[in-house]
Image (spheres, rainbow, N blue to C red):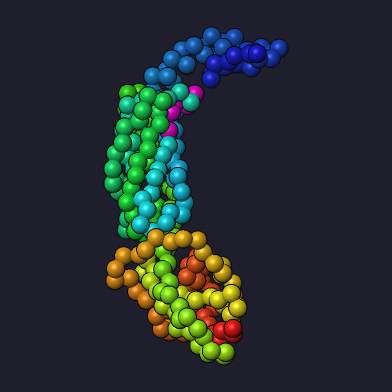
Amino acid sequence: MLHLNLISGHRDANSTDCPGSALYTQLPTLRRQVAAIAAPLTSVGLAAARNPVQFGQPIVLSGRLARAARTAIGGAPVAVQVLQAGAFSTVTTVATLADGSWSVTLPTSRGTTVRALYAGGGGHAAAVSAPLPVAVAPALALAPLPAGVHRNGLVAVSGTIAPAKPRLTCCSNAGSAAATGPRRAGPLAPPPAGSPPLCAPAPPGPTACACCSRAIPPTPRPRRLHR
């Protein structure tokens, strides 16, 4: 195995006279000059434990601060920032552990974009993570349905959704004109009081699926359910 300096000559790794004896003798001085003006490279990682997160649940973020050689930087402050009005602003600051790791929990009710920032210090350069969009999955609650439905009759469906959505589509396992969304969902946490009705009247136009909030064509008429 061959170990080289970051600033080396071709002759250090190959059978050649490059870069010439005059310049080669100046490489040690060049290395010292570069080291005096360049701080060690630093990186800060960022990840979300869950993405998307369920409405009402916090965002759990974590990462690691390290030098270029992946050695940890412990006891350093990492600012967690949220994108607001087109600019990132710090919402909390956390210190890294001895292994360079850090974690933080943020409350949220809507999707957001976060990043981690290390301002530098102690001979280490500043570093910032890539922006991380975090989505919030809506919480749905469906009111109990009537005990019996007449053939070719209509069923009134109601419930709540949080966070509030301007429009949504109700899907049944019998199919509908808006049959592009999921048909069933798992257990959901109850939404807060005052949430808008699940099937509020919606004007013509694109509709958001109650299950995944994707834009899908609207359903122009109620769906008849058959027993």
Looking at the image, the residue that sits furthest to the right is: 15
Q: Is residue 14 left or right of residue 45?
A: right
Q: Is residue 77 left or right of residue 49?
A: left
Tell whether position 67 is magenta.
yes
Residue 168 in view of the camera? yes
Q: Is residue 190 left or right of residue 130?
A: left
Q: Quadrant of residue 216?
A: bottom right
Residue 140 appears at what percent x and percent y?
42, 67
With respect to residue 170, does 52 lie above or below?
A: above
Q: Count how many numbered circles sit on residues in the image.
A: 0
The residue under the point 49% across, 11% down is 28
Residue 124 in view of the camera? no
With respect to residue 43, does 12 lie above or below?
A: above
Residue 80 appears at what percent x and percent y?
34, 43
Point out the stretch of residues depicted in magenta. Answer: 64-69
Q: Quadrant of residue 197?
A: bottom left
**Chief secondary structure of the magenta portion:** strand
With respect to residue 71, does 135 lie above or below?
A: below
> In what quadrant of the picture does the N terminus appear?
top right
Out of 114 and 101, give the one closest to the viewer. 101
Q: Is residue 10 left or right of residue 120?
A: right
Residue 14 appears at what percent x and percent y?
69, 14
Residue 200 appears at what percent x and percent y?
39, 80
Tell whether position 86 is magenta.
no
